[in-house]
Amino acid sequence: MAHEEHAIPQVPTHQEIASDIMARFQNVNQRYWSWVSLLALLFVGGIVGFVMRLSDGFDDRSNWGYYTATLSFLASTFLAMPIISAGLRLAKANWRRPLTRLTENMAITGVLIWFMLIPALIALPPTEGRLSVWFDFPHWMAFRGGNLMVWGTVVLIGLFLLWLLAVPDLAAVRDHMPASPRGKLARVLSVGWTGNTRQWRVLHSGALLFGAFYLLLYPTLQTLLQADFQAGLLPGMKDAIAPATALINALQGAVGLTLVVMYVMRRFGGYERYFGIDQFWALSKPLLAFSLLWFYFWWGSFITFWYGRQPGESELIRFMVLDSYRYPLMVSFMLNFIGPLVALVWNPVRRSIWGPTIVGAGVLVGALVNHIRWYVAPFSVPDPPAGEAWPHVLPEIPAGQLPGAADALIVVGGIAGAVLLFMLINKIIPVVSMWEVGEGLRLVKVRRFLARYAMVIAKSH
Amino acid sequence: MYYRRTLTEAQINQQLLGTVLTTPLWWIVLVSLLGIVVAGAVGAVGWMINQGLGVTGLRQPVFWGFFITNFIFWVGISHAGVMISAILRLSQAEWRRPMVRAAETMTVFALMASLAMPLVHAGRPWRIFYWVFPYDWARGIWPDVRSPLVWDPIAITTYLTSSMLFVYTALIPDLAIIRDRSTGWRRSVYGALSLGWHGNPRQWKIQGFAGILLSALILPVFVSVHSIVSWDFSVSLVPSWHVTIFAPYFVIGAVHSGVSAVVTLMIIMRKLYKLENFIWEEHIDALARLLMVVALAWMFLFWLDLVFALWLREEQEITVWMLRMFEPPWSWLFFLFFMFSFVIPVPLWMFRRVRRSFTWMLWTSLLVNFGMFLERFLIIVPALMRKGPQTFTYATYRPSPVEFTIIFGTIALVCFLLLIFSKFFPLIPLWEEKEGQLLIDHVKVGNVYVPALVKEH
């Protein structure tokens, strides 16, 4: 048997890591500005699309279907990303360290999402005479005010988490670039951080506490999104599983987006040593699990409606599954379930950079198409004649609605706006957490294990 | 910290094989007592078959009662094995090691108990014949394969078979150790069962691969079993049953009760078999953390079930929920269910001191399972009492002593089988413990030594 030599794994020092991340953070090159300009242009296009829709008013709700689909897509991918960092931190997964900041920085997109929510809420009909999770709660403020409050709280917690967990790195930026505008901003944001024991204790406790809040509140956001923007507009829709389905799909989208962003940062940002095979491999497993759950939740809903065969159920199946929106469903089925299952069941694919990235990109496309199905469809159902209560069965099945020019601008512009915000925040807060990666290095040592060298990773309580 | 007690391989063998190689008095007493209860239950079943289902509390319109509740309860408990073993194995959670075997074994015996229930419930067990063969030979009328009632036995027997395979695959290295310490016929039996295991690298490689493969393959079966049980309910049009959320709600509920049952089992095992060197506060703590997550997810789904039940404001749906929640005695049972399965245990588990107390964890895990039994009961009975506007007989359901005897008999049966198993096989896998010892280390952080694990580079 040939003797196999195993190299001793090299563990970098905290100093090396900090210097490297800081150097990349300081570097704002031409390519960065080109991308920022392009995204800004697309975002402006989105605003133009929005103004076009605004000029038509809110009377015809079907005009706002694609807008709402964009909103829900952003809320179910970008805004779901802090869950990854919060969840992995609670689970004490060591491999999370290089990617937590990336997911936390996405919380900044919550600002755009919250502002996008306002027109979508205005487009909704009042709750009088129709089914709503707000039941007989008086006045339109119930669902409009309630939504704004819940979404706003999620966004604020996400921003607070982003800031709290960035404070040590902001202090490093403050000390490294004292004269630059970014350094001055960091001075304000780092609130006198010196890294004493008490400050660290507050940071760790705060991260766990607010991370848990985020984890608990985000499902409520998805419940309201499904109930008010979908189920409440579809006569006969009694789908208790829908919010849970949306939550699972949001987690799948968040993992997919994390993988894609990691790949981009690797490829174009030079962050290869942080977003390595460990991160891709580890994230591909929950991606596979969420893909299986995608089917499981969809099937749980479908089989109940299919066997129920009540008039309301049959019409909804025809509308959302068999007739008007069957192609979006098929696309989503392939990209959110079949594709990930066929690809990620193989360990060599999971344990690669390209495999999870391609699957993640497919998941995002599938998620967008599925959100279009979920929200464009209910928005295309007309209101009942004035004075009549909302029916329990779809009176007639509307045709599938294709996007107009304004819709296309809104979809592209909305996504571009979110990416733009992410790119901007990355130049205020480093995209890789120096302190968290550094902390991880202190928990690692290399030791001889049988015939090879192995990493020993500490897991404290 | 994990693995604070380092044991040699000899010590592990000696301590874990104690019950296999010797027979303590308490074991004989306990097995005898449980055997009497099981015999009583068998007698009750015989009496019921002789007298007919009239000796139970089942009356028009409630024809699903304690037996079906108990069937769902044991299917739920059986979810612990895979939850603990397969998922934690795949996620390489180190703290799984002392509990996997007991959890997997409990799965097998719980499934056996659950499978017995539909037979008992049928009143005439030989009617199982018609689940497989035509109802009407002459015209070839077969059971409707589109019905989840037909899928149920298929899913459960698949789960039972794969669970037994799962237990057996993980047992092989330990069987070889017992073989090497036995004489006479026992040596022959263990020798045959251990399939010539010598622990060479190839065998370990295959064994490891089989464990991972079985873990991955059993997961869809695990999810499908309780989902199909839930579809027995949700594909019907009975108010409060015809809801889309039942499949994940049942699965999460099953995991909640199953993991709680593992906590109960681990604590009792630790006491009876003196396994203090293997089952520590940290293991129970980890299970309690897992339970908190599962309980919160379960509560989220319960809340969705309730909100969307009221969503359409249908009179019958509201009637059933009002019956469950506000009309005695169901309201009392509902209160107990809600308190026991969530309100009392979950806040308590937030305290580290409770999570690390064997006494607190024993009682809270027992509470959860009592609460979850009530939950299944409350799903079934009130809904059948008001299942349609044409239901004129608003009779209630009271389980009879015969039903109580049979229910207690199934609890005794599972405990009895676990005790018998422990006489012949170690309840904690020896090789898992030894592997765990091999992977432990410490890293010095500042002035503190933090427990650490080897990760292959």
Image (tube, coloured by chain):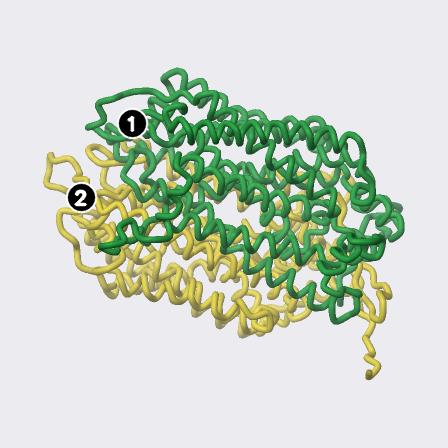
- Image quarter in which the N terminus of chain B is found: top right
Report x, y in % for residue B178: 80, 53
Separation of residues labelled 2 and 1 (CA atoms): 30 Å
Report x, y in % for residue B160: 54, 50
Report x, y in % for residue B123: 39, 34
Helix, strand or loop at disc 2? Answer: loop
Which residue is at 81% across, 75% downward?
Answer: A6
Which residue is at 44% across, 39% downward?
Answer: B119
Report x, y in % for residue B285: 70, 37
Whether residue B41 is situated above or below residue B433 in the rendered picture? above
Image chain in green: B
Q: Are marks 2 and 1 on the same chain?
A: no
Dot label at residue A393? 2
Label 1 belongs to which residue?
B61
Q: Quadrant of residue B61?
A: top left
Q: Say if mark 2 contacts mark 1, CB within 8 Å.
A: no
